[in-house]
Each structure stands twice: as C-alpha cells, then as structure tokens.
C-alpha cells in the first residue's frame, strides 16, 4: 500500500521505534521488510529500536495485565469511569447546556421576530442516521420544535464518549479549553424547568414558517 | 608482511556482553527461539573467524551486522515464503516460564516483564484496548478500527502513543525505581486528557 510505504519511509526517519513496530507486527510488505532490514545493517539507532521493541512486545504478549477483561468489558456495560473521563463528560454536558441556552434565547426572541430562518425546516428534517458528531451542532441549531428536541440534543451530547469530543488525531483538544460558567448552567436548568412545568402551548404552536411571510 | 592482530578474545568478550541484545535482535527478525539459538551460535563463530579484521571502535555495529546477515541467511534457508504466523501472540508469547526450551530467557528479564505489566495498567483506556486487541486477540488494525468505530489513523496513533508511553515509563523506572510509578502514572493521565 502506498500510504503504508510512505508511513514506513517517514517512520524510518522520524521514529525508528515505530518503524521497528511495523516490522515486528508484520504490517510491512516483503519489500518494505527488506528495506527495513537493509537499513538495519548500518543504522545503530534502528538496531536499538528493534531490540527494545522486540523486548517490549514480548513482554506485552506475556503480560498478565492483559487478561481479556478489557475487551470483554467493551461488549457489556461501560466500565469504571475515571476522573479524566468524568471530567470530559462534564465538559461535554456543559457545552451542550451552553448550546441549549443559546437555543432557548434564540427561540424566545424568534417568537417576536418576523424573520424566520430557512434552515429551520431543512435541518429539522435531518434523519437520525445523519446525526454524526460533525453535524450535531447543525442539528442542535435546528432543534427548535420543542423542549423534547432540546432534551434529545442534550442527551445526545451527554452520551458522547469522551474520546469523541477530542479531535480524532487527539493532537488538538480544543474542547479542553472551553468552560461554561456556572451561572449559565443554572440559567439553562431553570429555563428548562419552567418550560416543562408550564407546558405552555404557545411555544409548541409556533406558526409555520410560511405564515411569517404574511406578516 | 605484517601479521593481523588477534582480536578473538576481544570479540568473544563483546559477544558475551552483548548476548542479550544480539538475541533480542535476532528474535525480532526470526521470531523463533530455536532459530535464534542457532543464529546466535553462527554469529559468534563468524565473528571470531573474522576477528582479525575488526576495528575495536566499530565492534558493536560490526557484530550486529554479522547477526543480521546470519538471520537473513537463516530466513532464506528456511524459505523466505515461510508463512507469517497469524497468531501474533504465538510469535512473541513464548513465556520464559514455559518449558520445552522455547524460552525468552535472555531476551526479556523478570524485572522488565513486571515493569511492563505495571505500566500497561496505567495506560489510557483506549490505548490499552488497542494493545489488547492487537496483542492478545491478534486482530488486524483495520478490524480494530471497525470494531472500535474509529478511523484507522486514530487506532494507529493510539498504538504508537501506547508504545511510547510504555517506553518512557520503562526508562523512568530504570532511572529511578522508586519514583517511576508516580511519574509515569502522571504521564499516562496527561495523555488521556
């Protein structure tokens, strides 16, 4: 595979240990393995990398720390949440709460507003299958058809595994820099409670978009 | 006509000193402890035979080059097309406590094994899972990516980071056995943030 060859070439230069791992774990083609061995002849850093990685993998293969429990846990209930994950979940929830707050403000202001956004109808037609992390924000912006929708979005955010909040390459963790003040969380919760309690039909019976043209 | 110096004793001493490294090196190429034994013996014999030509300053690299040549020759003689062993654990999981001569003694030490066992437990959850799936279950990375619902690049990144973390933990432990645990624990936690 070209991509893999490029990966090997890069690893041989940048990270001999990773190149050694690719070799040891049979991730290389015959030609790539031969190239690696050719380099082994003259490169002491690669020799050391091969020795250390061989020992590392031999230890891992014999490690009591890997007893199959971890993979088994994956199929059943979520395992113990450590502090870091808890922190991520809290942050995800806080971000979601912030979005809901913005939505609530937008909804209430739109009640008196003449201008109704075209995205309203388009986005509420989003299928569940389209609710990927990338379009969650769009989905949440579109969820203006009631408290149930807001709650659904909130729950969706809360259910995001901690890793998904992080960039896939895990190099940049933008979300870690986000923080939502307590007052905003409190405001959101109070608004949600008030709306839920009153079951005010005026919110749910917002006039259809087409009617806005007549105003 | 000048006589060539007799470096055989020097070469023998270096072979003894470097035996664990040379064995690990050979194992990385051959993946079989019996073949490693044969290849190591041949390496020592070849090195002593050619000792007159060796430069003491480059002796180490010279020995590994001989070992590499022996291993490659061994692989060719065993037929290069020898199928890759699919069960990856079978290749590396030849416990040093197992009988029958298929031992990794001399390649990994009990201390190193203990250190790795301890370090694995401190890796972030996603990295541990990738290691376990690859090492224990023998899954290919592409399959792991599918089952964990992550891009292949992410899975490879986690594996790479896990190996780097384990290496760092090992180095810290070797430098300071008492401080290794807490320091490496923090390192793992940082990665999980």
Image (tube, coloured by chain):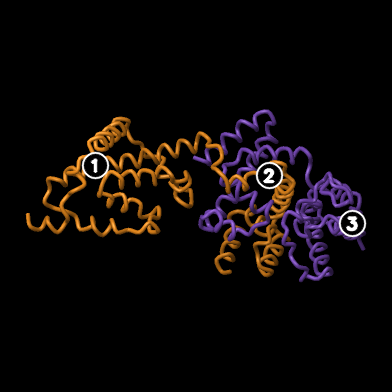
Q: Residue at x 69, y 44 (%)?
A: A67
**Residue furthest out toward the left:** A215
Residue B18 seen in the figure = no
Question: Would you call the spot at circle 1 few (<14 residues within 10 Å), some (14-19), or many (20 or more)?
Answer: some
Question: Would you call the spot at circle 2 few (<14 residues within 10 Å), some (14-19), or many (20 or more)?
Answer: many
Q: Label 1 lies in what chain?
A: A
Give me the chain that's orange.
Answer: A
- Callout 2 and callout 1 share a chain: yes
Q: Quadrant of residue A79?
A: top right
Q: Label 2 lies in what chain?
A: A
Q: Classify the position of the N terminus of chain B by image quarter.
A: bottom right
Element marked by disc 3: helix
Q: Position of residue B89 (x, y in %)?
A: 73, 54
Question: Would you call the spot at circle 3 few (<14 residues within 10 Å), some (14-19), or many (20 or more)?
Answer: some
Disc with the residue nearer the chain's start (2 vs 1): 2
Q: Position of residue B92 (x, y in %)?
A: 75, 53
Give me the chain that's purple.
Answer: B
Task: List the residue tagged with mark 2.
Answer: A66
The span from disc 2 to disc 1 (Cα, nearest Å) is 48 Å
Up/down of B109 relative to B157, above or below: above
Task: List the residue tagged with mark 1.
Answer: A104
Q: Position of residue A38 (x, y in %)?
A: 71, 64
User: Do the residues bearing badges 3 and 1 touch, measured as CB atoms within 8 Å?
Assistant: no
């Amino acid at each position: 595979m070209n991509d893999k060859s490029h990966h090997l070439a890069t690893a041989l230069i940048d990270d001999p240990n990773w190149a050694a791992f690719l070799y040891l774990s049979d991730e290389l083609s015959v030609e790539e393995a031969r190239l690696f061995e050719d380099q082994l002849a003259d490169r002491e850093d690669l020799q050391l990398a091969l020795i250390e990685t061989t020992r590392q993998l031999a230890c891992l293969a014999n490690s009591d720390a890997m007893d199959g429990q971890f993979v088994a846990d994956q199929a059943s209930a979520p395992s113990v949440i450590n502090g870091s994950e808890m922190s991520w979940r809290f942050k995800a929830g806080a971000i979601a709460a912030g979005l809901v707050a913005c939505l609530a403000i937008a909804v209430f202001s739109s009640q008196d507003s003449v201008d109704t956004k075209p995205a309203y109808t388009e986005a509420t037609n989003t299928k569940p299958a389209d609710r990927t992390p990338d379009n969650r924000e769009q989905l949440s912006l579109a969820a203006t058809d009631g408290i149930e929708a807001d709650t659904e979005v909130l729950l969706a955010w809360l259910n995001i595994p901690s890793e998904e909040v992080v960039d896939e390459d895990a190099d940049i963790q933008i979300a870690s820099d986000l923080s939502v003040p307590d007052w905003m969380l409190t405001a959101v919760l109070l608004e949600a409670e008030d709306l839920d309690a009153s079951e005010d039909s005026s919110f749910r019976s917002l006039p259809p978009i087409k009617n806005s043209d007549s105003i | 006509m000048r006589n060539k110096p007799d470096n055989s004793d020097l070469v023998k001493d270096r072979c003894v000193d470097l035996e664990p490294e040379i064995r690990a090196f050979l194992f990385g190429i051959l993946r079989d402890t019996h073949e490693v034994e044969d290849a190591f013996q041949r390496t020592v014999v070849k090195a002593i035979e050619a000792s007159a030509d060796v430069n003491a300053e480059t002796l180490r690299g010279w020995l590994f080059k001989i070992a590499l040549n022996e291993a490659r020759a061994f692989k060719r003689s065993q037929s290069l097309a020898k199928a890759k062993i699919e069960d990856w654990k079978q290749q590396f999981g030849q416990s040093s406590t197992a009988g029958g001569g298929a031992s990794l003694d001399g390649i990994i030490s009990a201390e190193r094994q203990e250190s790795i066992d301890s370090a694995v437990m401190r890796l972030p959850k996603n990295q541990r899972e990738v290691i376990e799936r690859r090492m224990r279950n023998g899954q290919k990375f592409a399959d792991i990516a599918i089952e964990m619902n992550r891009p292949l690049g992410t899975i490879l990144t986690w594996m790479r980071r896990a190996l780097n973390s384990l290496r760092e933990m090992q180095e810290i432990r070797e430098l300071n056995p008492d401080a290794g645990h807490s320091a490496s624990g923090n390192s793992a936690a940082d990665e999980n943030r």
